[in-house]
Image (tube, grey):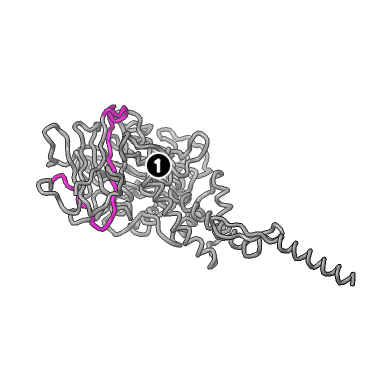
Amino acid sequence: MWKLFATGVVIAALSTVNAMAEETVDTRIGKLTFESGYPSAETVQKLYDEMDFQRASQAYIWGIPAVGLNEWRRAHYDVFGGKSGEMLSYLDFAEKLGILTPNYTTPYIATFIDLKETGPFVIEVPAGLIAGMVLDNWQRVLADLGVVGPDMGKGGKYLILPPGYGPVEADGYFVVESPSRDVLAGFRLLGDDKEKAIAELVPQIKTYSWTPEGTGEPMPVRSAGDKKWSQMAPHGMPYWDSLNEVIQRNAVDERDRLIMAQLKFLGIEKGKPFEPDARQKKILEDGVIVGEAMAKANTTDKRVEPPFWDGTNWKHALVVSTDQKANTYDQLDERAAWFYEAVVISKAMLTQTPGVGQRYIASYKDGDGEWLSGENTYKLHVPADPPAKGFWSVTAYDEGTRQMQVTEQGRPDISSRKEDIVKNDDGSIDVYFGPEAPEGHETNWVQTNADKGWFAYFRFYGPTEPFFDKSWALPDIEKIE
């Protein structure tokens, strides 16, 4: 009798212990179950899936600068048939259409150099109103070229050394040591007379290999042509294919080793083939969707800094440093905010010197705080005497591609270079955006696609003191119908 009673007590006690041992916790990722404090098998799998998904989403944001540049690098070789180090020109609308947020009126010349293939390589910069840069594979500035570079617009030869090549004796050259195998070197021509600048400066741009014993045959600039292409980061698994390619081709920075530890569980590892299983593919595909959504918010509704002019929706477009470093951290959101919708950076683009370089201010919303939509008609009032020693321009870009809008008008831009631009009596200018030209304002109108969102860049070339002290201010873009 006692034994039965005792057994009943034991059974009852065990039931109580078992009931107390299982615990369920509600979290933002759903219910998590723990047994005697340990996550259940189902919860372990859920947690690992969530860890990897979060890492994929953040790795998307982390990889934006490298993937964006890699897509252009691929096009240089695969679409345009470019050689390593061969400068290609992008002079008109059709040639520049694949580039993220280019200026409609400014000629571009650029090349990609595979330093593992070429060895030390030279860029010859002509004297004149020309500005450029050399970037590593993460779009960090290795050198400015031209008017804000060490040649100070007088021209010069830049010798780019591969990783680990070491210092060299090279009299007459500006020596640039690259930490990456792949680099971009590019220019923009800034003179008022576009055709004259192209005719005089482009033939003087030359590139060639270098050894202590001599140099290779110079390569002239050639046209990229109007082939269909896009530098935009791809969607889905192709994004990770591109990122993996960058990782396999270039050295891993010390700053990125923790990210590489996270990517390992998603199938991306230096020196190993990228062969994700079905689970990893699903997580990576979901990570692209959420990662890009985060990147859009981080770009179009920037929280990294306040509006440029108080009370407006205009903000700096370019919010990252040329070395991607802040005082106590490496910039992540800042670089993603720029490189999600743009390409390249230079000291000239962040100028603090009046009359030199460029500055870009962006807007994605109208004066009521609503997103700019192609179906509406808007007016931008540009006050008299914009603070730009060179010229100013305002360009409308497609929200989805971050490229110049393709419309029947064929011109996404209004600038001070436009000879027939109409001014008001006080010298101010009203620019109109919409699917159809407002009656009487056809000359100052930029057409938008009625079914797409758009955003604007206002560029100041050679910004003058009123830009820096903000005594001149640009009002919001206003919806008028």
Q: Is residue 264 above or below residue 381?
A: below
Q: Residue at x 31, y 34 (%)?
A: 309
Name, please, the residue furthest toward the right: 2
Instruction: Identify residue for label 1.
Output: 134
Where residue 22 appears, as percent x and y from the top left, is 68, 61
| Element marked by disc 1 | strand
Where residue 393 appears, as percent x and y from the top left, is 24, 41
Where residue 194 appears, as percent x and y from the top left, is 21, 42
Picture quadrant where residue 301 is located:
top left
Q: Is residue 223 part of the magenta span, yes or no?
A: no
Count the marks: how many? Answer: 1
Q: Is residue 255 above or below residue 154?
A: below
Q: Residue at x 54, y 66 (%)?
A: 279
The N terminus sits in image quarter: bottom right
Which one is in front, 312 or 276?
312
Please rate how many residues cluster around mark 1, counting C-alpha atoms within 10 Å: few if below 14, some from 14 to 19, many from 20: many
In the rendered structure, the answer to whether residue 119 lies left or right of residue 86 reads right
Where residue 193 appears, as percent x and y from the top left, is 19, 39
Q: Is residue 69 visible?
A: yes
Q: Is residue 329 above or below residue 449?
A: above
Q: Is residue 51 visible?
A: no
Name, please, the residue furthest toward the left: 440
Three-letter residue code for mark 1: Val
Q: Which residues are magenta?
A: 443-471
